Amino acid sequence: MQEVYDFLKKCGTYYLATVEGDQPRVRPFGTVDIFEGKLYIQTGKVKDVSKQIQQNPKVELCAFDGTKWLRVSGKLVRDDRVEAKAHMLENYPNLQAMYSATDANTEVLYFEKGTAVFYSFTEEPLTIVF
């Protein structure tokens, strides 16, 4: 999982796909964290993406570093603990102007049964299950 985290941090931006009814929705994200051995992302509960995840927690994200790309799929689970939110926000101080570990909007979610696959045009895919 560390390799997945490192790749996402290096890319800076990844794209998260959710479903709204029968319509796929994709948007850029940038938050990623490892907390208590789980891979987390962060958003706001008031956003459509949060509502879509709560309706259907199966998501996929994709990132590209110019040579290799990564796809991570799995189910996202909300973690409402202040400790999980605080850990994420400590790693993203620029978000602290918009989010707080104790507000009603901040949402952190972790991958349950995640599968990450690294791809390139020159190497065999590498799969990591976490």
Image (cartoon, helix red, strand yellow):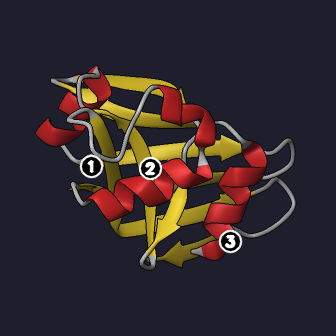
In the picture provided, is 75 more to the left or to the right than 66?
left
Q: Earlier in the sequence, mark 2 or mark 3?
A: 3
**In this figure, which residue is indicated by the disc labeled 1?**
58
Q: Amino acid at mark 2?
A: Ile
Task: Say left or right for 92 vs 121.
Answer: left
Give the foreground label among 2 and 3: 2
Q: Report the front residue among 64 and 45.
A: 45
Q: Residue at x 57, y 74 (%)?
A: 1
Q: Secondary structure at mark 2?
A: strand
Question: Residue at coordinates 60% horizontally, 41% vertically from top-left?
Answer: 93
Front in this rendered view, residue 101 or 5: 101
Question: Do the numbered discs 1 and 2 sit on residues whose CB atoms are within 8 Å?
Answer: no
Q: Residues within 10 Å of mark 3 (few under 14, many from 20)?
A: few
Q: Amino acid at mark 3?
A: Glu
Location of mark 3 (residue):
3
Q: Which residue is mark 2?
A: 41
